[in-house]
Image (cartoon, grey):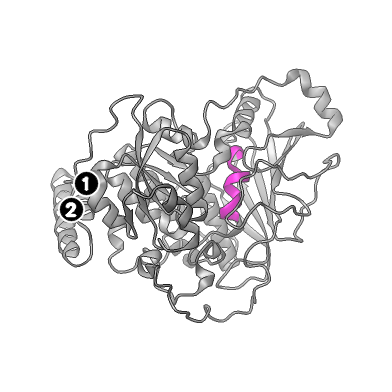
Amino acid sequence: MTKHNEASRRLFLKQAAALSSMMVFPTILTKAMSGTYSPASGLGGANERVNLACVGIGNQGGSDVFSLYNTGFCNIVALCDTDMGAPHTQKVLEKFPDVPRFQDFRKMFDKLANQIDAVLVGVPDHSHFPIAMLAMSLGKAVYVEKPMGRTFNEVELMMKAASKYNVVTQMGNQGHSEANYFQFKAWTEAGIIKDVTAITAHMNSPRRWHGWDTKMTKFPNAEPIPGTLDWDTWHSAVKMHDYNHDFINGQWRCWYDFGMGALGDWGAHIIDTAHQFLNLGLPYEVDPLKLEGHNPFFFPMSTTLSFKFPKRGSMPPVEIMWYDGVNNIPQVPEGFGTSELDPNIPPTSVGKVQPAKLNPGKEIYSKDLIFKGGSHGSTLSIIPEEKAKAMESKLPVVPVSPSNHYANFLKAVKGEEKTRSPFEIAGPLSQVFNLGVLAQQLNTKIVFDRETKQITNNKIANQMLVGAPARKDWEQFYKL
């Protein structure tokens, strides 16, 4: 693009945004689009605390608020949630009674942008994108819960924005700063984990939609909107739905329109280190081998997905088999031993993870060794036990993590560390899940061109990489 054309484009966006802002948009979005926003000068030094704005302060978002604050590295300077009257937001509001409160993140930035260094995005999957994009365009660091975005294109744009605006980013897969990360890295570099050809990943605990009527022909009936809830802003760019309690408070994860199901929820805690350190990138094929209870509205009762990745340099092709569903249990290798639920797995919004017939985790098959692992920060073990004992003397020393995931993010904002799950690493991982969810939703095999990032065997699936058009007045976030 020539300088003249780029200048014309920016002028057009500036004029369009200015016109829109008179009707809907806060001033800050107009400034972000026109490039006229001037961020604050930044942190004063290593001892300076990060001024953190928190968008989404209930359930997982609320847990993130406390986890970030408890590092001692940040000040909470703004709280934002579309339902400030909901029971699950009250703990945070009581802890920070004097912090400014907002129901619309756009208004928060409009009023306090120059007082904010970083932003927590702890909202439902479908709302990650606009909040993160506006924050990054304003030069703010972002901590975004997993998965990064609901569509492949949203994640692509988020990766490009992180690079364009040169901001610190972190996706909230907490185990990426715990023992599993450092062990997987050390064992790969030492040649203990090598020549991997297959990975089995599984999450067989009950999910919120299990037991629902899979013959559903329409969305649930409308119910009165709670008086404290900004239902319009809650939707962000997604088309409006009649309010129903099964769309909020974690239930959003059940629906294709809002969430990413078991794969998006748990894949980032189970597959993350293998994806990074085996340099898997994007698959060339995703095949739904089992979709029990498939329907067009919410996720199946059980899913088996095959993800195929090509040869990468000297590393052989890899197939990841994903299993979810209470009775959809993969076969485990001989010498597997017992399946124990790691007590360090953080609680979900509905409490502690319940033990399953096979607990969340993975088995990694290489030419010479088989590795057994759990979720989040759980470390790998070599199986069977006799093989593990034979390998003991060859195992490298694994470094201790210098910071948990939250401290790592804030220290990176302060210039003291680099984030371990930045968008350039977390983005392709999230896009693996985006492709998997498309295969689930359409009940079809997907053939994917890794170079062009296009689906080559299904036009509808290829169009859904971008997703449905953004709702009126929300399309501007896709132009930041």
Classed neighbour count for the residue bearing mark 1: other residues with Cα under 10 Å, few (<14), some (14–19), many (≥20): few
Q: Residue at x 19, y 64 (%)?
A: 20
- Specify whether 17 is left or right of 135: left
Contact? badges 1 and 2 (CB < 8 Å): yes
Asked if 300 appears above or below 155 in the picture, the reply is below
Instruction: Report the front residue among 438 and 146.
Output: 146
- Specify whether 202 is left or right of 127: right
| Magenta stretch, overall SS | helix
Kindly identify the amino acid type of the residue bearing the numbered disc 1: Met
Q: Residue 266: x, y in percent?
A: 60, 51
Nearer the camera: disc 1 or disc 2: 2
Residue 350 is marked as: none
Asked if 271 appears above or below 214 in the picture, the reply is above
Instruction: Provide the residue span drawn in magenta.
Output: 263-274
Q: Residue 321: x, y in percent?
A: 68, 51
Q: Residue at x 66, y 26 (%)?
A: 187
Location of residue 304 (image quadrant): bottom right
Residue, disc 1: 1
310 in magenta: no
Q: What secondary structure is found at the residue carrying circle 1? A: loop
Q: Residue 265: x, y in percent?
A: 57, 53
273 in magenta: yes
Q: Residue 248: x, y in percent?
A: 50, 66
Classed neighbour count for the residue bearing mark 2: other residues with Cα under 10 Å, few (<14), some (14–19), many (≥20): some
Q: Residue at x 64, y 44 (%)?
A: 345
Query: Can the viewer see residue 427?
Result: no
Asked if 90 appears above or below 112 in the picture, the reply is below
Instruction: Report the front residue among 90 and 120.
Output: 90
Query: Can the viewer see residue 167?
Result: yes
Residue, disc 2: 9
